[in-house]
Image (spheres, rainbow, N blue to C red):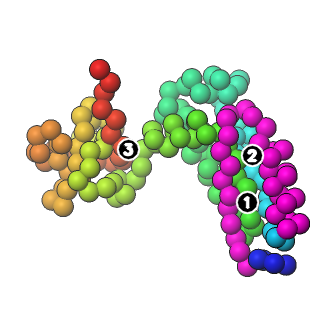
Amino acid sequence: MAGSGLHKRVLLLGPTGVDKATAMSRFRARAQSALGHVFRYVDFENDFLKPHLSVKNWTIFLAQDISQQATTWRQGWGDFRNTLNNENILLGFGLWQSVRLFASVWRLIDTAPLDQDVTLLVTDGRGEPYRIPHSCKRTAAGWVSSRKGTPLAVTPLQWKPYNPPRR
């Protein structure tokens, strides 16, 4: 089979709730007939997110607090990862919610960029983790407040891009 040594994953973004399966069906047929590539289509929203929804529909899901959405996404990605093998996959999911979620998901602390303003989730060892309300920076010397340049007296746990408050 032509290209049988290739293992690709193609991402299809489209509006939430729109039928992406029809477009993928045509793409799969064309890829197989013209190139000899066989793909499995995965409707991420319906196959992996929907089983974890704690609400009745997508509208309510999208109106939830972003941390609740992130929990559902993490569960869905965990399930999806467990299905991966060497097959070619066409992955479809909603553009609006995926872009919004990616910008809002907390990331591992060791992946934080140097000398850029970020939002931090921290712990002071006395209670639940909390978000610092102003931007911080990771420097070669450690974490500092972006405003004052002073070292943080807390332990950073996770980070995400900083979005200044709108006025």
Q: Residue 160: which disc?
A: 3
Residue 65 image label? none
Q: Is residue 60 left or right of residue 116?
A: right
State the extent of the magenta-drawn residues as a range. 5-34
Residue tagged 1: 89
Disc 1 versus disc 2: distance between alpha carbons? 10 Å
Mark 1: which amino acid?
A: Ile
**Can residue 128 be seen by looking at this rendering?**
no
**Is label 2 in a helix, a strand or a loop?**
strand
145 vs 67: above or below: below
Q: How crowded is mark 2: few (under 14 residues within 10 Å), some or many (20 or more)?
A: some
Mark 3, other Cα within 10 Å: few <14 / some 14–19 / many ≥20:
many
Q: Position of residue 167 (x, y in %)?
A: 29, 20
Question: To which residue does mark 2 refer?
Answer: 43
Horizontal side of residue 5 vs 111, given as left or right? right
For marks 1 and 3, the one nearer the N-term is 1
55 in the magenta segment: no
Q: Where is residue 30 in the image (x, y as percent from the top left)?
A: 85, 60
Residue at horizontal 11 percent and vertical 40 percent from the top: 148
Q: Which amino acid does label 3 sit on?
A: Lys
Q: Write down the quadrant of residue 22 in the picture.
A: top right
Q: Do the residues labelled 1 and 3 touch (CB within 8 Å)?
A: no
Return the x and y of residue 93 as percentages of the image width and height: 67, 43
Q: Residue furthest front?
A: 34
Q: How many marks are shown on the rendered structure? A: 3
Q: Which amino acid does label 2 sit on?
A: Asp
